[in-house]
Structure formats: C-alpha cells, structure tokens
C-alpha cells in the first residue's frame, strides 16, 4: 500500500494521530491530577470533576485556556505534545512550511476541542482522502511524519512560521 505524500512528506495515519492525541491527553490529565493533589484535593474529587455538569460557556472557556496552553508546543515542536511523541508535525497545506506559531497552534487546538462537540468534524478523517479533520481544513494544515521527504521550504515563509 502506497502512502500519500504532500510537499514530500508522508501523511500521518488516522490511527497514529488518534494515539498521539490520546497520549497527549493522558499526559495533560496527569499534570492536572498532580496539581489537584498538590493543592490538597483527593483523587475522587479529580475524577468527579470530569462528570460535573457545566454550561457551554464554562466548557468553552476551559477549552480556550487549554488551547492557549497547548499552543506553546506548536512554537517548539510544530505540533502538540502527542505529535512530538509520535514523530509527527503540522505543516501548512499550501506551502508545506512547519506550523511553528503559537497563535495558529492555539487556534487549531481550540477548533479541535470545540468541534469535538459536533462529533462529525472529528471523525471526518476516516473518509478524507488527505487524512484531514475539519479543523485541519479550516486552518489549512496537514499532519505529517517528520523526516519523511525532502521538502525545501519557500524563501518567503508564510505567517505560519512566526
């Protein structure tokens, strides 16, 4: 089976992307758990917090905070922590330049979190020929394997580089 390439990179599979997301989420939950325990809360309080009813506004604000935190990883790794662990990166779909931007990374993570409420945009990747979720299409990005391909970046990098 031949793997589809864009800008000289091999596209990451849906399975690899899912595993990367799960690992990043588990690491993030572990960090929050440690914070809870340090502040004197119990493990039961931590778990019950996941099942507490919240308003859409509260969920949206917490998603915004999480996205702002996760945006830092894009500046460093051209992707989130899960991408780093699985040797993946995010590139601009039109130019192939790495997405090493805090703002664009935070926007991508926020869209991922908010679109998860609608389910379909998240499973879009299962039938998309370019292995993109809806948030990838909105931010014009691909998730690719690092080191697979011989991409030559353009001399005039787009806004994604800053």
Image (cartoon, helix red, strand yellow):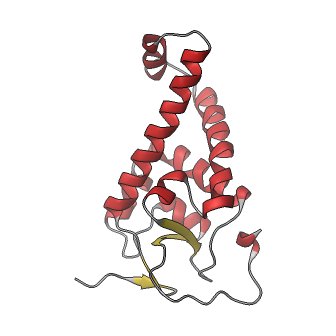
**Labels in figure, total:** 0
- Can you give x and y, in whole percent of width and height, for residue 40 in the image? 58, 9
Quadrant (top left, top right, bottom left, bottom right) of the N terminus: bottom left
- The foreground one among 63 and 23 is 23
Q: Residue at x 72, y 57 (%)?
A: 102
Above or below for 120 versus 95: above
Residue nearer the viewer, 119 or 94: 94
Image coordinates of residue 43 in percent, x first then y, are 44, 14
In the image, taking residue 52 as reference, residue 103 lies left or right, namely right
Q: Give the residue drawn at x 55%, y 67%.
A: 90
Query: Height in image: 16 above or below 30?
Result: below
Looking at the image, is 7 positioned above or below residue 160? below
In the rendered image, residue 162, in percent from the top left (x then y), is placed at 77, 68
In-front residue for pair 103/79: 79
Q: Position of residue 156 (x, y in %)?
A: 77, 86
In the rendered structure, the answer to whether residue 13 lies left or right of residue 41 reads left
Q: Residue at x 59, y 71 (%)?
A: 140
Residue at the extreme left: 1
């Amino acid at each position: 089976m031949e793997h589809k390439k864009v800008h000289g990179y091999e596209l990451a599979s849906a399975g690899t992307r899912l595993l990367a997301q799960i690992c990043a989420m588990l690491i993030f939950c572990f960090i929050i758990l440690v914070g809870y325990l340090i502040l004197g809360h119990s493990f039961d309080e931590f778990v019950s917090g996941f099942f507490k009813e919240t308003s859409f506004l509260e969920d949206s604000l917490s998603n915004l905070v999480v996205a702002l935190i996760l945006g830092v990883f894009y500046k460093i790794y051209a992707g989130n922590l899960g991408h780093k662990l699985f040797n993946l990166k995010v590139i601009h779909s039109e130019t192939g330049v790495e997405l090493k931007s805090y703002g664009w990374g935070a926007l991508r993570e926020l869209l991922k979190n908010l679109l998860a409420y609608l389910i379909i945009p998240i499973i879009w990747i299962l039938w998309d020929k370019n292995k993109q979720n809806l948030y990838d299409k909105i931010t014009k990005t691909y998730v690719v394997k690092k080191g697979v391909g011989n991409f030559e970046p353009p001399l005039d990098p787009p806004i994604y580089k800053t």
